[in-house]
Amino acid sequence: MLNSQVLNDLSIKIKSMAASSPLGDAEKNIYALLQGAFTKMELVSREEFDVQSEVLRNTREQLTLCEERLAELELVLKK
């Protein structure tokens, strides 16, 4: 979960930005601030997560096939 101190700091920064900038710029500033905070938390996008999940699934399939092949070769060598 998110650290409460991080959320408090984020809230303070958003309030100070809103008070010192025009409303039109506030949205851009808040977006940039949130992006920076999310980057520091090392979050990934859903798209990147899905891509890495697919890579992991393919790797697991290849590992399973390699393990099966190795077991077959070990049987042949023992005979």
Image: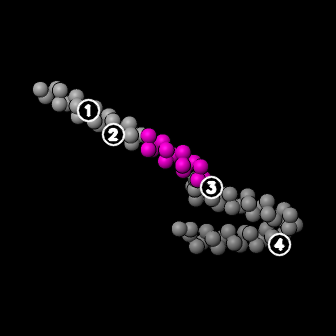
What type is the residue that disc 3 sits on? Thr
Q: CA distance from mark 4 to mark 1?
A: 66 Å
Judge depth for marks 4 and 1 and give the one in front.
1
Q: Earlier in the sequence, mark 2 or mark 3?
A: 3
Q: CA distance from mark 4 to mark 2?
A: 58 Å
* Residue at image coords 69%, 61%: 34
Judge depth for marks 3 and 1 and give the one in front.
1
Q: Which residue does the numbered mark 1 point to in the structure image?
A: 70
Q: On the rendered image, what quadrant is the C terminus found in?
A: top left
The picture places residue 9, in percent across and down from the top left corner, at 66, 70
What type is the residue that disc 4 sits on? Ala
Badge 4 element: helix
Q: Earlier in the sequence, mark 4 or mark 1?
A: 4
User: Which of the 4 image quadrants contains residue 78?
Assistant: top left
Q: CA distance from mark 1 to mark 2?
A: 10 Å
Badge 1 element: helix
Residue range in magenta is 45-58
User: Which of the 4 image quadrants contains residue 20?
Assistant: bottom right
Vertical position of residue 21 compared to residue 75: above or below: below
Count of picture labels: 4
Q: Which residue does the numbered mark 2 point to in the structure image?
A: 64
Q: CA distance from mark 3 to mark 1?
A: 42 Å
